[in-house]
């Protein structure tokens, strides 16, 4: 064989070796997911996207979390949680995401009931947020074992989920549920009335302008520092009128920011201590709001907000400790100084017509995490309203 042919053959061999051993082109590699059901996040991506969004994550079941840094792989204590990883053999908890299993999925995906699920790959859609103080998925709405070809996502058949915070309320309705929710949200960290100013600058911040707050009844965005008592200033509105029970601005009901909101000074004065009902004349400044001699109707986009704030107050304040008022809802207007607020039938309608939105959820989280340490159950679980009233 002459030197030219030897050189050519050597070149061909080298080329075959090079292409045969090189990695697959990037077009053949798995693309990053976008968090949708059809293109789920990997566990690693979901850990990096703990932003409270509702997304789908796919991974292998590697155990049940029992604390922030501890995942058990046998003798599962309950059906409430599981851990996912990108590898079925993963042992490092920092590479896992913890899944809160709602009651509607526990019989199918809980490891105490289904230990054979260890190592299975599943998809979960839920809120990407901490669970057990660890990267997690909460309030899952879809869960499915991954199969070739895929199938429609599973839908819950049992009642809606109750997060760990509400676990004592599970299975209860009516007066028993109301009492249990009271016990859960009772004894919150109380603010002084002066501290409410700064809290409202945070809770009611305009999502499009962090220097402004959104005024409840008018919807106007204005400087967070324009608070006070002058015309066009904003002040602290007691959505449960403070005269209804005569608690004023005392710490407790009078400073509970779950029902205190920024409102225009003159609009606040117009609302006064009116009960809530439909009808009346349009308010000149609070566009979309109506009022008459005995009632106030807020604009459509906050009717549900108002209702859920009053539901909260009627559950939080039961008069079970000294000097604490017992607040209740009724179906009347002109409640005056009695510890009642109406009109319940209308509030129930508003709750259905104006569902919970992201502004309410954000507000609820801030109050819980930064100020009072308690939550409005009717924002987290709107179905509680019907179960009580």
Image (cartoon, rainbow, N blue to C red):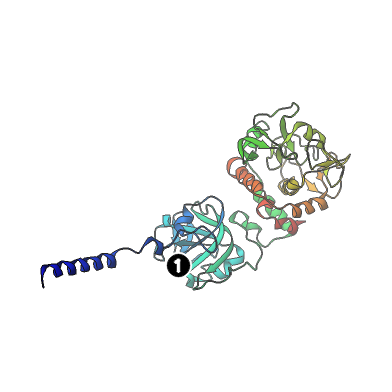
Q: Which residue is at the far left?
A: 2
Answer left or right for 156 relative to 174. left
Residue 28 image offset from top left, x and y in percent: 40, 64
Which residue does the image show at 74% across and 27% down from the upper left? 229
Observer able to see residue 67 = no
Q: Which residue is at the far top?
A: 230
* Mark 1: secondary structure: loop
Which residue does the image show at 83% across and 42% down from the upper left? 290
| Quarter of image, res 232 | top right
Q: Is residue 150 above or below residue 215?
A: below
Of 385 and 338, the residue lying toward us = 385
Which residue does the image show at 18% across and 70% down from the upper left? 9
Residue 89 image offset from top left, x and y in percent: 39, 65
Which residue does the image show at 52% across and 60% down from the upper left? 99
Observer able to see residue 206 = yes
How many neighbours does mark 1 have within 10 angstroms: few (below 14), some (14-19), or many (20 or more)?
few
Mark 1, residue position = 74
Of 12 and 202, the residue lying toward us = 12
Residue 69 image offset from top left, x and y in percent: 44, 55
Of 361 and 80, the residue lying toward us = 361
Q: Is residue 17 above or below residue 355?
A: below
Q: How many labels sit on residues? A: 1
| Quarter of image, res 264 | top right
Quadrant showing the N terminus? bottom left
Quadrant showing the C terminus? bottom right
Residue 164 image offset from top left, x and y in percent: 58, 56
């Amino acid at each position: 064989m002459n030197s030219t042919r030897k050189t050519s053959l050597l070149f061909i061999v080298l080329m075959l070796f090079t292409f045969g051993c090189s990695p697959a082109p990037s077009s053949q590699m798995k693309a990053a997911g976008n968090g949708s059901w059809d293109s789920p996040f990997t566990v690693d991506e979901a850990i990096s996207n703990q932003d409270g969004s509702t997304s789908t994550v796919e991974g292998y079941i590697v155990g049940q979390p029992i604390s922030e840094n501890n995942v058990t792989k046998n003798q599962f204590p309950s059906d409430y949680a599981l851990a996912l990883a990108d590898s079925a053999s993963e042992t490092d908890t920092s590479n896992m995401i913890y899944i809160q299993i709602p009651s509607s999925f526990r019989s199918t995906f809980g490891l105490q009931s289904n230990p054979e699920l260890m190592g299975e790959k599943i998809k979960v859609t839920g809120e990407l947020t901490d669970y057990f103080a660890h990267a997690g998925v909460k309030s899952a709405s879809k869960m499915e074992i991954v199969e070739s070809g895929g199938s429609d996502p599973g839908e819950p058949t049992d009642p809606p989920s109750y997060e760990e915070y509400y676990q004592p309320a599970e299975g209860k309705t009516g007066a028993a549920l109301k009492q249990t929710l009271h016990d859960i949200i009772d004894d919150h960290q109380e603010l002084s009335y002066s501290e409410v100013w700064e809290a409202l600058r945070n809770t009611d911040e305009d999502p499009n302008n962090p220097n402004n707050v959104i005024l409840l009844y008018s919807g106007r965005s204005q400087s967070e520092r324009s608070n006070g008592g002058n015309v066009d200033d904003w002040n602290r509105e007691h959505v449960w009128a403070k005269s209804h029970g005569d608690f004023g601005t005392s710490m407790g009901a009078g400073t509970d920011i779950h029902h205190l909101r920024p409102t225009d000074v003159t609009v606040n004065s117009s609302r006064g201590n009116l009960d809530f009902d439909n009808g009346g004349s349009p308010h000149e400044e609070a566009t979309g709001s109506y009022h008459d001699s005995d009632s106030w109707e807020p604009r459509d986009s906050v009717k549900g907000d108002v209702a859920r704030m009053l539901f909260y107050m009627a559950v939080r304040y039961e008069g079970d400790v000294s000097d604490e008022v017992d607040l209740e809802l009724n179906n009347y207007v002109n409640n005056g100084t009695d510890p009642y607020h109406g009109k319940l039938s209308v509030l129930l309608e508003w709750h259905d017509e104006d569902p919970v939105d992201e502004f309410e959820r954000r507000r609820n989280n801030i109050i819980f995490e930064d100020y009072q340490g308690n939550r409005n159950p009717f924002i987290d679980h709107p179905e509680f309203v019907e179960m009580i009233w």
